[in-house]
Image (cartoon, helix red, strand yellow):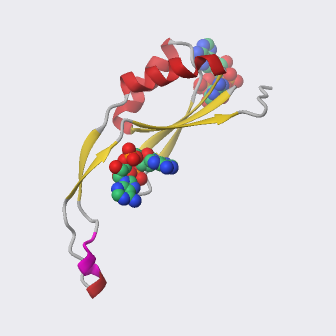
Amino acid sequence: MKLLMVVVQNKDSAKLSQALIEKGIRATRLASTGGFLRMGNTTFLIGVEDEKVDDVLSIIREHCHARQQVVTGLTTPTAQLGHEFPMPVQVQVGGATVFVLNVEAYHHY
Ligand code: 2BA
Ligand code: 2BA
């Protein structure tokens, strides 16, 4: 068995959730926050049999899309001089960041 930890943009989380339900794949959704942008995102925990991992990955690819995000509030190197000049920066936020972990044991009481 594998545990997929999947960080997705909030905009895609409802569609991903729905697609997983339709395919009978169980999941847990956690509200999370990106460490860099400090914006809300959603982390899915998905425990699946090894042979279903590829199916889950293709569902994720189908429903999660990369987007450009303009961010203000990041500071320029001039901040080192003691003044912070917020500068708009464009960042590409990925469709999904996926970690696949081996599951040592799975219990369901
Ligand atoms: P939920 O996803 O809200 O599911 C609540 C209950 O609804 C489940 O209880 C199960 O009886 C039923 N259920 C869920 N998905 C189903 C499906 N695709 N088809 C038919 N019935 C379904 P539990 O199985 O005891 O799960 C309780 C909670 O544990 C779940 O809440 C979910 O948050 C988490 N969970 C369960 N299995 C998981 C897995 N393989 N990976 C990640 N999280 C899991
Ligand atoms: P955030 O940390 O808010 O990052 C959003 C986007 O900002 C990232 O998109 C990346 O394009 C950029 N970014 C992040 N850290 C950066 C840095 N130190 N310098 C320059 N640009 C940076 P993604 O890479 O697609 O990541 C989307 C979200 O997935 C992240 O949100 C974070 O919540 C999660 N994530 C990505 N890589 C991770 C990792 N290795 N471990 C845990 N979570 C990760």
Closer-to-camera residue (69/55): 55
* Residue 27 forms part of the magenta stretch: no
> Residue 8 location in percent, x, y?
42, 37
Please identify the residue farthest to the bottom as the structure is shown: 81
Direction from residue 33 to residue 81 in the image, left or right:
left
| Residue 98 shows in this picture | yes
Quadrant that contains the C terminus = top right
Quarter assignment of residue 11:
top left
Which residue is rendered at x = 57% and y = 18% of the image? Answer: 25
Direction from residue 85 to residue 28 in the image, left or right:
right
Q: Main secondary structure of the magenta part?
A: helix
> Residue 70 location in percent, x, y?
22, 52
Which residue is rendered at x = 44% and y = 20% of the image? Answer: 59
Magenta stretch: give its range: 75-79
Quadrant that contains the N terminus = top right
Which residue is rendered at x = 40% and y = 27% of the image? Answer: 14
From what the image shows, is residue 82 above or below residue 17? below
Number of numbered discs? 0
Which residue is rendered at x = 69% and y = 34% of the image? Answer: 102
> Residue 43 location in percent, x, y?
50, 39
From what the image shows, is residue 8 above or below residue 88? above
From what the image shows, is residue 22 above or below residue 14? above
Closer-to-camera residue (28/8): 8
Direction from residue 50 to residue 69 in the image, left or right:
left
Quarter assignment of residue 51:
top right
Closer-to-camera residue (52/20): 52
| Residue 40 shows in this picture | no
Quarter assignment of residue 89:
bottom left
